[in-house]
């Protein structure tokens, strides 16, 4: 049986899910986390559903058997769409949180009634996303844009120098892709008929928020899923009695003993460890010693 001291598992096809891990760490600073980037098979958004589902099952099993996780966050929109229902059936006792593009939160904030949605092709063409859109389509005008190659370009960018301040948006590969897809969507802004809300339907995209902001202007609201997912994960752990509460934070309790040698965050990858190390340092300020390469058959 899982215990409150066991870690929370988090996985994505690559390093984009670190944006979700960042929110989880902020929401639950006393928890331990094991993050797995399946970078050897990224990006999932350009793979078929059967392949993504098989990887999701394999990684879930690996994290349960090798790391004894007490809960799993599928920090990948594409894997959620392809496999979340099957994983719930296969692991009925495991608290499980998935992702989907935050369409409903976008509806709550748009004033023009025009909403842009960007994501991987795998997510935006999935049956799960289709059902979500069909249930809400009469509540706003949606412009849905698959961004082929953007998640993969963001993965590659972590090993490159940060763009020089003031340089054109399209001076980098990620920026050029952002320009292409934003321009294809139409007009952004707060005037009638313009899209005043942009849903970031892939965990990677928050890491190009600066480029997107330069293209759509200051008045457009970005909606992403990291913080809502972190809150939902905390709620599930509390309901299951699995939320870790250090002894010295409970009234009347003595100080907690020294922390165990197990690091609070372990970052694993099936691909090159250098990419994960660079992303962990750039986006989470975590040292390379947190990272290691693993094999998940």
Image (spheres, rainbow, N blue to C red):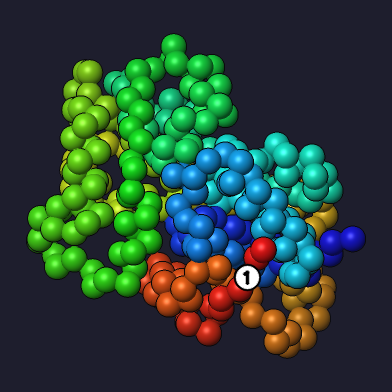
Residue at the spot 67% in from the left edge and 70% down from the top edge: 32
User: In the depicted view, which residue is nearer to us: 170 or 209?
Assistant: 170
* Residue 291 in view: yes
Image quadrant holding the N terminus, namely bottom right
Say few, some or many: other residues with alpha carbon within 10 Å of mark 1 (under 14 / 14 to 19 / 20 or more). few
Among the 4 quarters of the image, the one containing residue 160 = bottom left
Residue 128: x, y in percent?
Answer: 57, 29
User: In the depicted view, which residue is nearer to us: 290 or 148?
Assistant: 148
User: In the depicted view, which residue is nearer to us: 200 or 269?
Assistant: 269
Q: Secondary structure at mark 1?
A: loop
Residue 64: x, y in percent?
Answer: 77, 62
Residue at the spot 34% in from the left edge and 68% down from the top edge: 158
Total numbered labels? 1
User: In the depicted view, which residue is nearer to us: 207 or 221?
Assistant: 207
Residue 27: x, y in percent?
Answer: 58, 58
In the picture, measured across the screen, residue 106 lies left or right of residue 237, that is: left
In the picture, measured across the screen, residue 281 lies left or right of residue 60, that is: left
Among the 4 quarters of the image, the one containing residue 199 = top left
Image quadrant holding the C terminus, namely bottom right
Residue at the spot 61% in from the left edge and 41% down from the top edge: 50
Residue 156: x, y in percent?
Answer: 34, 64
Above or below, 220 against 42 in this view is above
* Residue 19 in view: no
Among the 4 quarters of the image, the one containing residue 174 = bottom left
Residue at the spot 84% in from the left edge and 61% down from the top edge: 2
Q: Residue furthest right?
A: 1
- The residue wearing badge 1 is 295
Above or below, 146 against 258 in this view is above
In the picture, measured across the screen, residue 250 lies left or right of residue 293, that is: right
Above or below, 254 against 275 in this view is below
């Amino acid at each position: 049986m899982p215990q409150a001291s066991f870690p929370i598992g988090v996985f994505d096809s690559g390093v984009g899910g670190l944006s979700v891990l960042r929110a989880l760490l902020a929401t639950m600073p006393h928890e331990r986390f094991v993050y797995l980037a399946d970078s050897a098979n990224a990006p999932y958004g350009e793979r078929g559903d059967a392949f993504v589902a098989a990887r999701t099952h394999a990684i879930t099993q690996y994290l349960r058997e090798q790391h004894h996780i007490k809960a799993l966050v599928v920090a990948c929109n594409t894997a959620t769409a392809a496999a979340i229902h099957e994983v719930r059936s296969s692991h009925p006792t495991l608290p499980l949180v998935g992702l989907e593009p935050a369409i409903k939160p976008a509806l709550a904030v748009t004033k023009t009634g025009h909403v842009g949605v960007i994501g991987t092709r795998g997510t935006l063409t999935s049956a799960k996303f289709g059902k979500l859109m069909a249930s809400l389509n009469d509540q706003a005008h949606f412009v849905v844009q698959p961004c082929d190659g953007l998640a993969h370009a963001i993965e590659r960018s972590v090993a490159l120098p940060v763009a020089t301040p003031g340089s054109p948006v399209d001076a980098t590969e990620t920026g050029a892709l952002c320009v292409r897809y934003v321009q294809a969507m139409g007009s952004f802004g707060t005037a009638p008929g313009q899209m005043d809300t942009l849903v970031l339907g892939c965990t990677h995209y928050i890491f190009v928020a600066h480029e997107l902001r330069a293209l759509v202007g200051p008045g457009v609201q970005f909606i992403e899923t990291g913080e809502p997912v972190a809150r939902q994960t905390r709620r599930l752990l509390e309901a299951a009695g699995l939320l870790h509460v250090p002894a010295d934070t409970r009234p009347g309790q003595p100080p907690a003993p020294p922390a165990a040698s197990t690091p609070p965050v372990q970052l694993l990858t099936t691909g090159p460890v250098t990419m994960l190390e660079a992303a962990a340092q750039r986006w989470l300020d975590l040292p390379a010693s947190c990272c290691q390469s693993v094999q998940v058959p």
